[in-house]
Amino acid sequence: MTFSYALATPSYRGDVDRCRLLCASIDRFVTGHGVHYLLVEDRDVPLFRDLEGPKRRILPESQLLPSWLKPRPDPLSLGRRRVWTGMRALARGLPPLRGWHAQQLRKFAVATVAGEDVILFADSDMLFLRPFDLADLERDGAVRLYRKPEAIAADMARHRPWCENASSLLGLGAPSYPGPDYINNMVSWRRDHVLGLLAHIETVSGRDWVSAIARDRQFSEYMIYGYYVERVLGLEAARHWPDPRELCKVYWFPEDVAGLDLLKTFEEVLEPWQVAVGVQSFIGQPLDKVRALFERQASA
């Protein structure tokens, strides 16, 4: 079986320069995809417009999420941050959501408008550093799924609510520990399974899928999808092959970047199978430093 592929990147105005660098790295190193979708809030569309091209398309949030869930200035932060809410959202029992919640919902929603078979998510604070063909995600008619076995223990306070939320949404019994982790950069989903997942959630909950997922702020899009394709469909039936390797090396915390200043090239830290690096935007690493390392790599 041959699949068609797309990339998708949820982003926002604070990450526009990082997203610009990501796009440059995709144009330099990535092949095998029909389109790269940028999923952004409507007010941010003009900031990203110059990134559009024959293989890159902007999807405003209004094309993805229902009209009753709108971003607004957060009065608790004097308008510096955004909150997704509204009278109709509150009436549905949804608590006010943050930007990272909206980005997760956009990832589910892109499957409702995309035409490609497989969607690979690339966060806007990562960049590709080696040639990568999306067709390499396919093996014997199955698509790669990041799955790290026995990685979530019962005492992991952040992860456990995500697991329990996913089980509840899907009408499953309580999760057992240690359990698999599906959260990573460069996660690939099959679009048909996302559509089946959303329909399944609506059947179990009796609600629209946005209301069902977002009524509890402790949700993880990757855990929900992973639980669905493994515990509801079964990985073999879903035509997914599990891979515990991380295709993107990620700097998650400020202490992780201690050696970044000493690097001459990212090649020094990449494993043979890794094709990208992610430097989380919230750890305060100057983008110029990351850009310089990328340009050094791209010109090598």
Image (cartoon, rainbow, N blue to C red):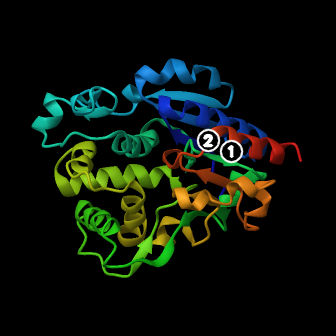
Location of the N terminus by quadrant is: bottom right
Outermost residue, top direction? 46
**What percent of the width, then of the height, locates residue 13?**
48, 28
Q: Residue at x 45, y 40 (%)?
A: 110
In this view, the residue in front, 281 or 62, is 281
Tag 1 secondary structure:
helix
**What percent of the width, then of the height, locates residue 18?**
60, 37
Outermost residue, right direction? 300
In this view, the residue in front, 256 or 269, is 256
Residue 40 to residue 297: above or below: above
Residue 286, labelled with which disc? Answer: 2
Residue 219 to residue 238: above or below: above
Q: Residue at x 76, y 56 (%)?
A: 263
Q: Is residue 34 visible?
A: no
**What percent of the width, then of the height, locates residue 141?**
63, 64
The amino acid pointed to by label 2 is Pro
